[in-house]
Image (tube, grey):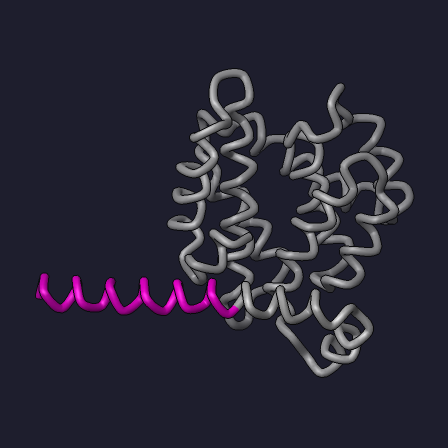
Amino acid sequence: APVGIVNAGKPRAAAAQAMEGASLIHVTDVAFCQAGAAAIAAAVSAALVPEATIDGVLRVAVGAIKPWSGAEMRGLIEQAIALVDETGDYKRFRSAYHTSFRRPIPCDSREPVPAALALGKIAHGDPWQAAILAADFGRDADTIGCMAAAICGALSGVSAENESRLAQLPADAIERERSLAGRLVEVRHRRLSLEREQLERAI
């Protein structure tokens, strides 16, 4: 999600940077984690574009994954999203997902990443609903909730309704997250300034 924020509106750049970062530790038999990181970063980046929709964001997330090296993760995400339409109900989706998508290790990204994107669709882009659904999902619920709510939060922004919900959370937690968000946005602005300067020099 932070990579998506600093690459707001540039999902392919977000995906590339996320893959590069993930490649530091996720290699060989866990290299598929790079594709999962790319999908989430691209989704957050695309969600920050005005007028974005959850369906559009999901399409961008899938499209940001490399078709060959990321084929497994790409296929799993597409299957999970299709499962949402097939089941038409959260409880049926959850049951079907656990039947088909479980891995020996719950934090294997091939299980939580497709789940997070699918729950974003079930929640219709509502971060609070995404968090609630994820908390009730089981397995690596905190990771799923973090990813799903980050995507939906980027999509919905901080509305008046969200402000009232945030007021129920611990003040120090809110301050910490706002500070982090502010620093990430500053990085994005600095990158934009550098890109403009480079473009002007090139012209």
User: Quick check: 126 left or right of 19?
Assistant: right
User: Quick check: 89 left or right of 19?
Assistant: right
Check the image and name the residue furthest to the bottom: 160
Magenta stretch: residue 184 in it?
Answer: yes
Residue found at x 57% / y 57%: 56
Picture coordinates of residue 154, whole percent (x, y): 59, 64
Location of the C terminus by quadrant is bottom left
Residue found at x 82% / y 73%: 168
Tell me where residue 115 sits by quadrant: top right
User: Quick check: 2 left or right of 6?
Assistant: right
Picture coordinates of residue 135, whole percent (x, y): 83, 49
Tell me where residue 175 sits by quadrant: bottom right
Q: Provide the major secondary structure of the magenta segment.
A: helix
Picture coordinates of residue 11, whole percent (x, y): 44, 53
Residue found at x 48% / y 38%: 65
Magenta stretch: residue 45 in it?
Answer: no
**Between 36 and 99, which is closer to the camera in this rendering?**
36
**Between 168 and 129, which is closer to the camera in this rendering?**
168
Residue found at x 50% / y 50%: 42
**Between 138 and 61, which is closer to the camera in this rendering?**
138
Check the image and name the residue furthest to the front: 172
Picture coordinates of residue 93, whole percent (x, y): 84, 41
Residue interval drawn in magenta:
182-203
Tell me where residue 32 sits by quadrant: top right
